[in-house]
Amino acid sequence: MADKITLFVNGVEVEVESGKNLIDAVAAAGIEIPHLCYHPALGADGNCRMCLVGIEDGRPPLVPACKTPAQAGMKVLLDAAHIKKIQHDVMEFELINHPIDCPICDQAGECKLQDYYMTYHGQPSRMTVPQVQKSKKLDFGCGVVHDQERCVTCGRCVRFCRQITKTGELGIVNRSDQARVTIFPGRPLNNRYALNVVDLCPVGAMTSRDFRFQQRVWFLKKSPGICHGCSKGCNIVIDHHREKYADDRIYRFRPRLNLQVNGYFICDEGRLSYRRENEGRLTVARIGGQPAAVADALAACRDELQRAQKVVVLLSPSCSLEQMLAAREWAARHGAILSGFSDGYLKPGDGDGYLIQDDKSANRAGLLLLGIDCRRETFLAALAEAQLLINCDNELERSFPLEELQQLLMGIRTILATSHDSPCAATADIAVPVASFSEYDGAVVNCDGILQCFRKAVGKNEPLPDMADFIAALDGTAADRAGLFTALAALIPALAGQSADTVPAQGLKLNENEAAHVSA
Ligand code: SF4
Ligand code: SF4
Ligand code: FES
């Protein structure tokens, strides 16, 4: 916990953390100092001058708040007439050549220039000469489209590529009103985090080809979530919207700050994985390849269970802890063999030592935590004896070529509960559609042993059962989610006394012992 110091803003005493610059220090106390070029992940550049404030201690009349450390007893002036004038003048300067067409800009509604204009300027333009014209639609690569006229040359995007990805594809060329952000000839953006420049850009100069002009941002509902693209478990905002007469649909994932997990950023692959939540879904159950009602498919599953003596339950390494525990308890009650075999989710060498991990599953640590066997040989041995395989959304196609998989499953009845359609869903004896991760509550443990809870974000017009519902339905009962969490809390010491609502937003770091194994 950082030390606290007291300073004064407009004569009002404020307690802030020491060691921060004035922008961040007073922001934590709910006071905004306008800024464009400063970003906490990139540091202070001092180029936009939007953050100028007064300090009553004999210093020059104006100092940039981004470069001024908060100090005890400091008297900061934000509302004096000369401060308001400089904010007004900086805004007027920024807007000399900026297109005044917010209604057709993709950034409208989440643009700092638009917000600051309304707060600090609000005057019509005094310019009578034509604005400088620049390129409007430059393809910078990696799905980033740049509008040079909207750029305020704050340099955040340039610094991101230099400091964070260390790829340096962007630069600012020329000076004064001819200054512009560009790529080197023939060398577009080429890094796995490039789309973060779209979030970093305070104005509408960097847009995502994928999202631009798809939806006005004020219609989007912003729900917190956890990316399931790899074992890092980056924190995301799920932006979704239900158009009239249509279903709730996700339009984009954006990074959500968690200094313990992903900081300010996410990778592009995870960002674009929102599409998978919308597309390729299994929404109708199948019995023998024919469409069926979910209730009929579940009844057919119970009939299969009546007939089978040797049952194997296979879990996806992306199931939530609650779903894994439900499967573990079910398998123990019914004498079934439980496996978490999922080697195909591992892509050795794909991780980059920053956010992207080799393991493309969200909760392999959860399988280990619950002591679920993930070994290939034990899974194959169990399968050799099995009469019935209940597959809980494990994409076996990742682990075996299709022909080999067909051979392996020859003579075994298969029930597949899955959120997505696939060759396995097409050939399963019974396929049951289940909710995907944006549609249920759950907890996962990431590659660093951090347990995080997430909430249902998207409400479909026709909700599907989640995996815990499916497992309970095999016994003809309903899932007891609160009971499952309580059972988890009894198993995992770090969760003692917690509910899903009290787990801290930045997650709970499990200690080495419990992260390794909770005995069955
Ligand atoms: S494109 Fe955006 S982030 Fe980059 S310099 Fe211009 S305004 Fe700043
Ligand atoms: S690093 Fe992994 S968890 Fe993070 S956004 Fe990318 S795929 Fe998702
Ligand atoms: S934020 Fe301080 S000069 Fe730009």
Image (spheres, rainbow, N blue to C red):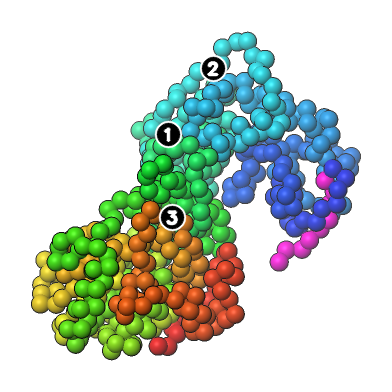
The local secondary structure at tag 1 comes to loop
When asked about the image quadrant of residue 468, the answer is bottom left
Q: Which mark identifies residue 132?
A: 2
Q: Residue 510 appears at what percent x and percent y?
A: 53, 76
Q: Distance between the residues labelled 1 and 2?
A: 25 Å
When asked about the image quadrant of residue 283, the answer is bottom left
Q: Mark 1 or 2 closer to N-term?
A: 2
* Kind of residue sitting beneath label 1: Phe
Q: Give the range drawn in magenta.
A: 1-9
Residue at the top extreme? 128
Q: Which mark identifies residue 458?
A: 3
Circles 1 and 3, Cβ within 8 Å, touching? The answer is no
Give the answer, above or below, for where 314 lies relative to 113: below
Which quadrant is home to the N terminus?
bottom right
Q: Name the residue under label 1.
A: 213
Q: Mark 2 or 3 closer to N-term?
A: 2
Q: Mark 1 or 3 closer to N-term?
A: 1
Q: Main secondary structure of the magenta part?
A: strand
Tell me if 184 is positioned left or right of 418 in this view: right
The local secondary structure at tag 3 comes to loop
The answer to whether residue 477 is magenta is no
Count residues near mark 2 (Cα–Cα under 10 Å), then give few for <14, some for 14-19, many for 20+.
few
Count residues near mark 1 (Cα–Cα under 10 Å), then give few for <14, some for 14-19, many for 20+.
some
The answer to whether residue 8 is magenta is yes
The local secondary structure at tag 2 comes to loop
Circles 1 and 2, Cβ within 8 Å, touching? The answer is no
Q: Which residue is drawn at 51% across and 54% down?
A: 223
User: Residue 507 or 308: which is nearer the viewer?
Assistant: 308
Q: Residue 424 appears at what percent x and percent y?
A: 19, 64
User: Residue 490 or 272: which is nearer the viewer?
Assistant: 490
Circle nearer the viewer, 1 or 2: 1
